[in-house]
Image (spheres, rainbow, N blue to C red):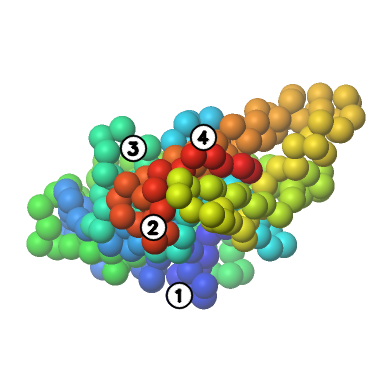
């Protein structure tokens, strides 16, 4: 979840470009009241921070990406390009849909403008269409000073950056603990002989978790790591619900009906 510098590749998920927000270039810009984000509607998983785990687990499955540097992800769909919680314009399909902080931050983020400096600047994705001079919405600058809208955006991005650093620390400890294993979920829909298998992610190995020494378990509890681990484990039951949503929305596997059983 580390922030990338403008024009660096690869850019973070959803971002197609980055401009540093400044009064010289964007002094007359406004933040649109509403705009479409079709790329969100085509995204099946988004990063989440460890601080969100307790609320995310009530809405989405939380899994960990594969690879050497795994990150936590909320599953919005079980297949590439399938999103069961946001429509084709990137808007939530239900009034109670929880919107992860990663999506609420977009199209803004904090990024390093120079690789030789640790200073972060507020940037935005100009391709998102959220900022424009002729927009009906809140101004981003008043003269050469940021407006309250811009200050609030900056504060949220700073909070997200801090949460991202805590998430990175959590993941480093999780990897070090050796509790991660390759994940596999089998869902057996009604009327289908063979279950549908979903792989390509990582999850907590419950057997290894049960064998953790008492002193290590106490450290994990005191650091807040243990509640996050259990939030992840509890969230896995949501995978069956996401599959059901795909079937209900006509985005499930051919011939699949609502699932009878799911194993993780």
Marks 2/1: CA distance? 44 Å
CB under 8 Å between callouts 2 and 1? no
> Which image quadrant is residue 204 in?
top right
Which tag is nearer the camera, tag 2 or tag 3? 2
Is disc 3 placed on a helix, strand or loop? loop
Q: Nearer the viewer, residue 45 or 240?
A: 240
Closer to the N terminus: mark 4 or mark 2? 4
Closer to the N terminus: mark 1 or mark 4? 1
> Which image quadrant is residue 94 in?
top left
Residue at horizontal 18 percent and vertical 51 percent from the top? 34
Residue at horizontal 61 percent and vertical 58 percent from the top? 199
Residue at horizontal 25 percent and vertical 58 percent from the top? 88
Which tag is nearer the camera, tag 4 or tag 2? 2
Marks 3/1: CA distance? 32 Å
Q: Which residue lies under the disc numbered 4? A: 57
Q: Which residue lies under the disc numbered 3? A: 97
- The label number, if any, that marks residue 255 in the structure image: 2
Alpha-carbon neighbours of circle 2 within 10 Å: few (<14), some, or many (≥20)?
few
Q: Which residue lies under the disc numbered 1? A: 7
Q: Nearer the viewer, residue 250 or 113?
A: 250
Residue 104 visible (yes or no): no
CB under 8 Å between callouts 1 and 4? no
Residue 259 visible (yes or no): yes
Marks 1/4: CA distance? 34 Å
Screen quadrant of the C terminus:
top right
Marks 3/4: CA distance? 12 Å
């Amino acid at each position: 979840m580390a922030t990338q510098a403008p024009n660096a590749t690869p850019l973070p998920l959803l971002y197609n470009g980055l401009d540093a927000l400044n009064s010289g270039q964007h002094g007359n810009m406004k933040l649109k009241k509403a705009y479409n984000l079709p790329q969100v509607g085509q995204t099946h998983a988004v990063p989440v921070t460890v601080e969100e785990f307790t609320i995310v687990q009530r809405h989405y499955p939380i899994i960990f990406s594969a690879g050497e540097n795994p990150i936590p992800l909320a599953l919005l769909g079980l297949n590439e390009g399938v999103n069961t919680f946001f429509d084709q314009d990137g808007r939530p399909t239900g009034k109670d849909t929880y919107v992860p902080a990663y999506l609420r931050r977009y199209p803004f983020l904090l990024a390093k403008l120079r690789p030789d400096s640790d200073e972060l600047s507020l940037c935005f994705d100009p391709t998102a269409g959220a900022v424009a001079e002729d927009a009906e919405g809140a101004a981003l600058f008043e003269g050469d000073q940021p407006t309250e809208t811009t200050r609030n955006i900056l504060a949220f991005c700073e909070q997200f950056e801090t949460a991202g650093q805590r998430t990175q620390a959590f993941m480093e400890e999780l990897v070090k603990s050796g509790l991660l294993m390759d994940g596999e979920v089998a869902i057996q829909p009604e009327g289908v002989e063979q279950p549908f298998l979903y792989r390509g992610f990582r999850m907590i190995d419950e057997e290894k978790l049960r064998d953790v020494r008492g002193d290590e378990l106490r450290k994990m509890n005191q650091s807040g790591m243990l509640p996050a681990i259990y939030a992840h484990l509890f969230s896995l039951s949501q995978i069956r619900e996401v599959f059901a949503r795909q079937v209900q929305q006509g985005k499930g596997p051919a011939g699949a009906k609502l699932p009878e059983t799911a194993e993780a």
